Image (cartoon, coloured by chain):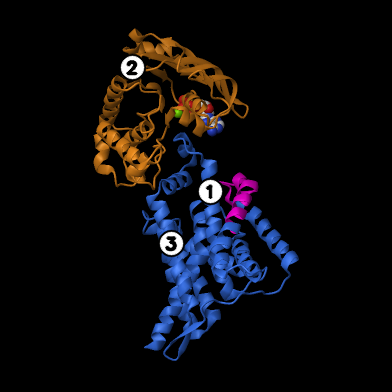
Amino acid sequence: MSHLLEVSGLSAAYGLVPALHRVDFHADRGEVVGILGHNGMGKTTLMRAIMGYVKVTGGEIRFEDTSVLGQPVNARARAGIGLVPQGRQIFPNLSVEENLQVGIPGKAAVVAQTVEEMLELFPRLKRLLDRRGGALSGGEQQLLALARCLCRRPKLMLLDEPTEGIQPSIIDEISETLAALTQKVDITIVLVEQNLEFIAGLSKRVYAISNGVLEKEIPRAELTDSRSVSAFMGFTA
Amino acid sequence: MDYTLVVALEMIRAIAWLVLLASGLAIIFGMMRIINFAHGEFLMLGGYTVVISTNAGVNEWVSILILAPVVVGVFGIIVERLVIQRLYGRILDSLLATWGLSMLMMGGVTMIFGNTVQGVSTPFGGMKIGAYQVPIYNFVLIGFAVLVLVAIWCVLKFTKAGLIARATMQNADMAEALGIRTRWVYMTTFGIGSAITGLAGGLLAPVTGVVPTMGMNLVGQSFITVITGGASVIAGTLSSATLLGTISQGVTFLTGPVYGDAALLVTALVLLRLLPQGITGRIFKRSL
Ligand SMILES: Nc1ncnc2c1ncn2[C@@H]1O[C@H](COP(=O)(O)OP(=O)(O)O)[C@@H](O)[C@H]1O
Ligand SMILES: [Mg+2]
């Protein structure tokens, strides 16, 4: 069977400044692919290009064997791509419950049922349901952003730096929840991060991205050793 | 006793008047952040729809409750497609474009219908409270002001469409990633704001009569009410209309209508000096 997501020769630019250069990678059904890179290397641009916010200047993005390049963001979402964006982008003046409800397609009963399921997966959100999204802590917002994305039951989830600025206890919680989730449901995750430990704990394959160029795969054996990863990514420890 | 009742009634009518003027704009400006400088002309268009169709033999209530909102709503959707959709997030450009639109509409209506006041009869006549004669239509205005607010509140609070509209106005990019067609949401929301404005214009027409320049007198009061209220549609409109309506009508009773209008302005100015984000920028923050 072909790949769920196939990105080939993808280039993108902000005006004349290139941000992605001929990126090739793929993600298969049920796997977690990690992309590791420092600040400003193009991780967010890659996520936003796949989701449809960033105009690409060359290459191809295929999802379930169909090119999505001509499709607006909402169509890609309805095709089964979900995004947990950097900075979380919680709707600040909607309640936590409304943040979850808003993206769920279907009738009221389906909506309620889906919210229930999400609360099982993210029990910490239960007692926050009536709070304004904007009033949550960063970690709580991150859990909410994950739950909001999963409410749509995406086939592919794009995760942009879920650990950024989050307290360690919640990072562990996110990691455990995602690990349990991939065991339970058929979901593919593309995860971009600076956090080596987090990405190594979840991903089957990990690539490094540097200045908009996706480097070759980092062998799993080297992922456990931060010095060799640093060397791999062009930094000396 | 009768006098107190009449004064109280007049105050409530003044509040209802501001609510009707401002509700559609509260959606378009408060929620969508589009400065519709042609808001007064949208009201005018609603008024003309009622006067023209009633004089052509259509039942007056059908004209007010159906034709006015439909005509102005459809007009709003066309304007959104042609002009406004390019201007989201560009608040100054939206001001200039809709200013142009307002002059175009004034000119157009003057050309077609002439620059004279036209009117329709005010339904229901009057009733007596003690020695005072009160138009029964005042109660109609008050009733519809309540109805409009309750309807907007119910839609925003209890329907999926209302939730989607609120989410889209808060963060359209994120709403897109949740599968929401935000272009469509913007268009519909603008259309509904316009339709409510059309209904308001239709309801006011029997009181004010219509003239192509009538929007100029109304746009100021509408914007003052919405800006004073702040971003939330229901709580903002209701609280500022109550405050401004009571004070301006109170002053009108004591000293005459000129000072009443001035009092409205002064109150708004003082309030915005104290609460730059409007009333609901500081209190009732969570409300709709
Ligand atoms: N909206 C933008 N306009 C112009 N340049 C941008 C914009 N967003 C990102 N960039 C630039 O593109 C490069 C990649 O940024 P980004 O994808 O956000 O990196 P990362 O997510 O890895 O930190 C950086 O050099 C950044 O300055
Ligand atoms: Mg980033």
**Residue matched to label 2:** A200
User: Residue B88 lies in magenta, yes or no?
Assistant: yes
Q: Which residue type carries mark 3? A: Leu
Residue name at image x 45 percent, y 79 percent: B10
Chain A palette colour: orange
As drawn, B262 above or below A131: below
Do residues under tags 3 and 2 come within 8 Å of each other at their CB atoms? Answer: no
Q: Nearer the viewer, residue B61 or B34?
A: B61
**Both on one chain, marks 3 and 2?**
no
What is the secondary structure assignment of the residue under circle 2? helix
What is the secondary structure assignment of the residue under circle 3? helix
Badge 1 or badge 3: first in the primary sequence: 3
Decide if residue A121 is on the left or right side of residue B160: left
Q: Which residue type carries mark 1? A: Thr
**Residue matched to label 1:** B188
User: Residue A73 lies in magenta, yes or no?
Assistant: no
Mark toward the viewer: 3 or 2: 3
Spot occupied by residue B92 in the image (x, y as percentages of width and height)? 60, 52
Distance from label 3 to label 2 (Cα)?
54 Å
Colour blue, chain: B
Span shown in magenta: B72-91
Chain where mark 2 sits: A
Q: Nearer the viewer, residue A193 or A72?
A: A72
Residue furthest to the right in view is: B111
**Both on one chain, marks 1 and 3?**
yes
**Residue matched to label 3:** B149
